[in-house]
Amino acid sequence: MKQFITALFFVGAIMALIGAILYISVWKEYAPYIYTIGAGFIAFAQINTPLEVKSKILKRLRIQQIFGAITLVLTGAFMMFTNNNEWIACLTIAAILELYTSFRIPQEESKVKNQSN
């Protein structure tokens, strides 16, 4: 199951990247759908990834990570239903949240594991 979630995340990330690039360049009709499906895969993978260690800080970081994943999907909605570039601001917020939590969660997990040993 863990390999499936990892593969789903990888495919979703590639699809989201391709969708964003296509939206900026040529195929504005299909790009939001490709992006939104990829963002949905990313969100599904992150929501179904369990935490190895439980702590107050990790729960807060996990909520931030899930909020970032939902913001990625919301970016797809902005791509579909708005004519301007509001989706870029939403994507920037999601990227900052995802980047922050991707560094902090492993760091905090290792800190908690070292304290328990």
Image (cartoon, rainbow, N blue to C red):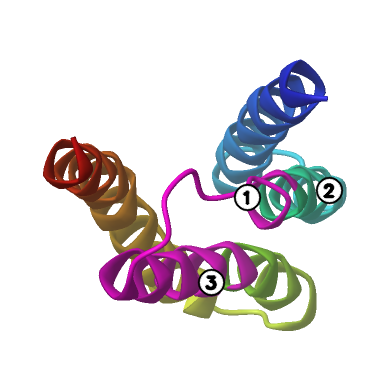
Question: Magenta part mainly helix, strand or loop?
Answer: helix
Q: Is residue 59 magenta?
A: yes
Query: How far, Cα to Cα, is label 1 from label 3?
Result: 21 Å
Residue 19 is situated, as x and y percent measured from the top left of the image, at: 68, 41
Q: Residue at x 68, y 57 (%)?
A: 47
Range covered by the magenta-colored residues = 45-70
Q: How many marks?
A: 3
Residue holding disc 1: 46
Say what secondary structure mark 3 lies in: helix
Q: Nearer the viewer, residue 4 or 55?
A: 55
State the image quarter where residue 45 is shown. top right
* 117 lies left or right of 97: left
Which residue ends up furthest to the front in the rendered image? 117
Camera-side residue of 66 and 87: 66
Query: Which residue does the numbered mark 2 point to in the structure image?
Result: 37
Q: The residue under label 2 is which amino acid type?
A: Ile
On residue 87, the disc is 3
Vertical placement of 16 versus 71: above or below? Answer: above
